[in-house]
Image (cartoon, grey):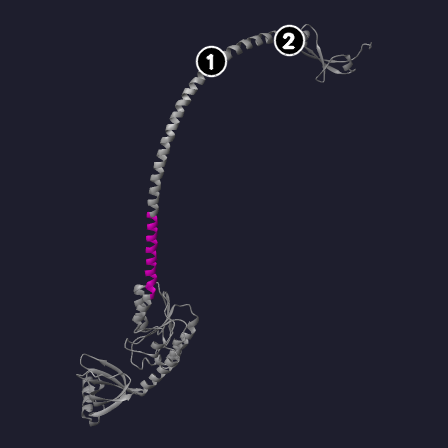
Amino acid sequence: MNRQMTVSQLSRYIKGVFEDEELLHDITLSGEVAEVSYSERHTFLVLSDGAFSVRCVHFSSRDKIEKGAFIALRGSVNFYDKRNSVTFTYSEFFSQGVGDKNTKLMQLKQKLCDQGYFTDRPQLPKYIVRVVAVTSPDGAAIRDFIRVVHDENQFVVIEVYPVKVQGEGAAARMADAIAKLQSYNTDAIVLCRGGGSDEDLDAFNDEQLAVAVATSRIPIISAVGHEVDYTLCDYCAGTRAGTPSIAGQVVNAHAGRIVADLATYMSAIKSCMESKYQRNVLRLNRLGKATTYAATKRISRQYGLLRSTAIELRHSASNRLQSFAASTADYAARMKSALAVRYMASRAKTDKLTALLSALDPHRIIKVGYAAVAKRGKRISGAAGLDLGDDIDLIFSDGTATAHITAVKRNAKE
């Protein structure tokens, strides 16, 4: 028969079933504590048994119960109809030792410690400018990490190596990612995962992954879960950050040193340059004053010497000029007399030579009716220079004429 019900009717019905079932009241529930948390007055537990778990609460009490403990709780099962959730409400608890899961984890932790995987891990370098985050690319953890880093240091390069961070095969994939990154150029590896239950963080307690973290040559920051959560990877990593956001702050501390050190170096260089500049200014000022004093003193001394020398030179020059003027006037008079004598002798000689040249001048002879004879531009002085048929030039005082030799008669030689 099909019955119609509202959500509230169904919730109230289920609540009544839980209240009426005697087997669910005044029972002792045992298991391993997977989670512990508190409000102001209440204690909240997750009790697990293998793959099964149940939420438990103790109202008005803050019980000192450690995660991983095996305990028994006395109480009843309740159904909260407004949230449709089942909770075991207990009134007292009994410790029964350590849970099996926690025992195995502690044994593995001791084994890794004895093998030296918790000590001498590679530490972060002084400066960080490049990191690789091994994490889920879609989770809030990587977004928080990137936001925290880039809020302060946007120059830091963050690369994401995408992997599963929980569930079957997650540990092996993260271990493989760390192994492959050993040849990669990065300053640090960040193993990153947000908060969750103990079951969500089981992959980070895997022995294979813990050994991969411990043997990494590249420094690893383990940023897994909440601050109160500790995994084997936290112990094997060189640096533990309680959360992905804290990992971002760790990276910022190393990245910020670059800016801080650069500022320090720049300040030191500036101070050194200013100090050297001031020393040079003082040195130049002292040198300038000394140079000015020495130059003034030397100029004054040289001016005195020059003035004294000028006076002496002027007096000496005046005497020499007077002496030179007298000797020059005497020399000029004697030279004038000698030149006059030489002039008269030269004039007589010139007149004599002029008369001789005039007597020997061929033009004078030509002017009286004689002519000069030339053959092919050369003067002919006699009949010996002529041949029958020659053309000759007759040169007169007022021009020239051309003649043709038709006969040549030479005088007999004596």
Secondary structure found at label 2: helix
- For image coordinates 44% across by 17% down, the residue present is 321
Q: Which numbered disc covers residue 353?
A: 2
Q: State yes or no: residue 119 in magenta.
A: no
Under mark 2, the amino acid is: Leu
- Locate residue 83 relative to residue 257 in the image: left or right: left
Quadrant containing the C terminus in the rendered view: top right
- Locate residue 146 relative to residue 322 in the image: left or right: left
- Observer-nearest of 163 and 176: 176
Visible residue check, residue 320? yes
- Observer-nearest of 136 and 90: 90
Location of residue 276 with respect to 88 vertically, above or below: above
Residue 80 percent across, percent down from the top left: 20, 85
Magenta stretch secondary structure, dominant:
helix
- Observer-nearest of 310 and 266: 310
Residue 367 percent across, percent down from the top left: 67, 7
Residue 254 percent across, percent down from the top left: 34, 66
- Locate residue 2 relative to residue 341 in the image: left or right: left
Q: State yes or no: residue 262 in magenta.
A: yes
Q: Which numbered disc covers residue 186?
A: none
Displayed quadrant of residue 138 = bottom left
Quadrant containing the N terminus in the rendered view: bottom left
Visible residue check, residue 154? no
Residue stretch rendered in magenta on the structure: 254-278
Q: Which residue is mark 1?
A: 326
